[in-house]
Protein backbone atom coordinates (compact mmCIF):
# COMPACT_ATOMS: atom_id res chain seq x y z
CA UNK A 1 0.00 0.00 0.00
CA UNK A 2 2.19 2.83 -1.20
CA UNK A 3 0.24 6.07 -1.62
CA UNK A 4 -3.26 5.07 -0.60
CA UNK A 5 -5.14 5.05 2.66
CA UNK A 6 -7.88 2.53 3.40
CA UNK A 7 -9.87 4.79 5.73
CA UNK A 8 -9.92 7.50 3.08
CA UNK A 9 -10.95 4.92 0.45
CA UNK A 10 -13.81 3.85 2.72
CA UNK A 11 -14.88 7.46 3.28
CA UNK A 12 -14.78 8.07 -0.48
CA UNK A 13 -16.96 4.99 -1.10
CA UNK A 14 -19.35 6.11 1.62
CA UNK A 15 -19.71 9.62 0.19
CA UNK A 16 -19.57 8.68 -3.50
CA UNK A 17 -16.29 10.40 -4.32
CA UNK A 18 -15.31 8.34 -7.37
CA UNK A 19 -12.06 10.23 -8.17
CA UNK A 20 -10.82 9.57 -4.63
CA UNK A 21 -11.85 5.90 -4.87
CA UNK A 22 -9.95 5.63 -8.16
CA UNK A 23 -6.87 7.21 -6.57
CA UNK A 24 -6.74 4.79 -3.65
CA UNK A 25 -7.46 1.70 -5.75
CA UNK A 26 -4.73 2.74 -8.20
CA UNK A 27 -2.39 3.25 -5.25
CA UNK A 28 -2.88 -0.37 -4.25
CA UNK A 29 -5.37 -0.17 -1.40
CA UNK A 30 -7.16 -3.50 -0.95
CA UNK A 31 -10.90 -2.93 -1.52
CA UNK A 32 -11.67 -6.10 0.45
CA UNK A 33 -9.93 -5.07 3.66
CA UNK A 34 -12.16 -4.37 6.67
CA UNK A 35 -10.42 -2.09 9.16
CA UNK A 36 -10.85 -3.34 12.75
CA UNK A 37 -12.31 0.02 13.80
CA UNK A 38 -14.92 0.09 11.02
CA UNK A 39 -15.58 -3.57 10.05
CA UNK A 40 -17.30 -2.61 6.79
CA UNK A 41 -16.39 -3.02 3.15
CA UNK A 42 -16.22 -0.06 0.79
CA UNK A 43 -18.38 -2.00 -1.69
CA UNK A 44 -21.27 -2.53 0.74
CA UNK A 45 -21.00 1.09 1.93
CA UNK A 46 -21.27 2.34 -1.65
CA UNK A 47 -24.29 0.13 -2.31
CA UNK A 48 -26.10 1.19 0.85
CA UNK A 49 -25.59 4.87 0.07
CA UNK A 50 -26.52 4.67 -3.60
CA UNK A 51 -23.15 5.26 -5.23
CA UNK A 52 -23.50 2.82 -8.11
CA UNK A 53 -20.55 4.24 -10.05
CA UNK A 54 -18.29 3.67 -7.06
CA UNK A 55 -19.63 0.12 -6.63
CA UNK A 56 -19.00 -0.60 -10.32
CA UNK A 57 -15.43 0.69 -10.04
CA UNK A 58 -14.73 -1.36 -6.92
CA UNK A 59 -16.12 -4.50 -8.56
CA UNK A 60 -14.05 -3.91 -11.67
CA UNK A 61 -10.93 -3.56 -9.53
CA UNK A 62 -11.03 -6.58 -7.27
CA UNK A 63 -13.80 -6.08 -4.72
CA UNK A 64 -15.17 -9.48 -3.76
CA UNK A 65 -18.86 -9.63 -4.75
CA UNK A 66 -19.59 -12.14 -1.96
CA UNK A 67 -17.59 -10.63 0.91
CA UNK A 68 -19.81 -9.98 3.93
CA UNK A 69 -19.42 -6.57 5.54
CA UNK A 70 -19.15 -7.49 9.22
CA UNK A 71 -20.69 -4.41 10.82
CA UNK A 72 -23.58 -4.28 8.35
CA UNK A 73 -23.88 -8.09 8.39
CA UNK A 74 -24.64 -8.01 4.67
CA UNK A 75 -23.03 -9.27 1.52
CA UNK A 76 -22.92 -6.91 -1.46
CA UNK A 77 -25.82 -8.84 -3.02
CA UNK A 78 -27.94 -8.41 0.11
CA UNK A 79 -27.07 -4.70 0.30
CA UNK A 80 -27.95 -4.17 -3.36
CA UNK A 81 -31.29 -5.91 -2.96
CA UNK A 82 -32.18 -4.25 0.34
CA UNK A 83 -31.36 -0.76 -0.92
CA UNK A 84 -32.97 -0.98 -4.35
CA UNK A 85 -29.86 -1.29 -6.50
CA UNK A 86 -31.63 -3.73 -8.83
CA UNK A 87 -29.23 -3.52 -11.78
CA UNK A 88 -26.25 -4.11 -9.52
CA UNK A 89 -28.07 -6.94 -7.73
CA UNK A 90 -28.57 -8.65 -11.11
CA UNK A 91 -24.94 -8.03 -12.03
CA UNK A 92 -23.75 -9.46 -8.71
CA UNK A 93 -26.02 -12.50 -9.00
CA UNK A 94 -24.86 -13.10 -12.58
CA UNK A 95 -21.26 -12.95 -11.38
CA UNK A 96 -22.01 -15.71 -8.86
CA UNK A 97 -22.27 -13.58 -5.72
CA UNK A 98 -23.62 -15.43 -2.71
CA UNK A 99 -25.84 -14.08 0.05
CA UNK A 100 -25.82 -16.98 2.43
CA UNK A 101 -26.47 -16.33 6.10
CA UNK A 102 -23.80 -17.41 8.54
CA UNK A 103 -23.78 -17.32 12.33
CA UNK A 104 -22.07 -14.26 13.82
CA UNK A 105 -19.19 -16.32 15.23
CA UNK A 106 -18.27 -17.62 11.76
CA UNK A 107 -15.91 -14.68 11.20
CA UNK A 108 -13.75 -15.77 14.16
CA UNK A 109 -13.78 -19.55 13.81
CA UNK A 110 -12.57 -21.34 10.69
CA UNK A 111 -15.42 -23.76 10.00
Image (tube, rainbow, N blue to C red):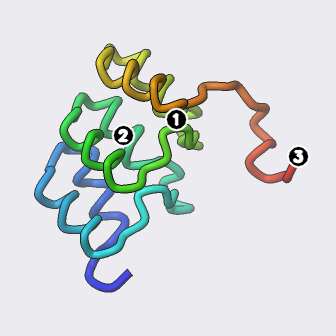
Of the numbered discs 1 and 2, the one sitting upstream in the chain is 2
Camera-side residue: 64 or 6?
64
Residue ID at (43%, 65%): 30
Residue 86 is situated, as x and y percent measured from the top left of the image, at: 32, 14
Q: Is 54 situated above or below 88?
A: below
Residue at 27% across, 40% down: 56
What SS does tag 3 mark? loop
Locate residue 80, reporting x and y percent. 39, 23
Tell whether label 1 touches label 3 (CB within 8 Å): no
Structural distance between the alpha carbons of marks 1 and 2: 9 Å
Residue 34 — which label? none
Neighbour tally class for label 1: few under 14, some 14-19, many 20 plus, Cα within 10 Å: some
In contact (CB < 8 Å): disc 1 and disc 2: yes
**Which quadrant of the rendered structure holds the N terminus?**
bottom left
Residue at x-position 56% and y-position 62%: 36
Residue nearer the viewer, 11 or 22: 22
Residue 85 is situated, as x and y percent measured from the top left of the image, at: 31, 19
Q: Which residue is mark 2?
A: 45
Q: Residue furthest bottom?
A: 2
Amino acid sequence: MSGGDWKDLYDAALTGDLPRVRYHVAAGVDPNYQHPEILCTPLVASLIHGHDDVAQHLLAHGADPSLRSHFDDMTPLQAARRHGRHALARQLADAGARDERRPFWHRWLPV
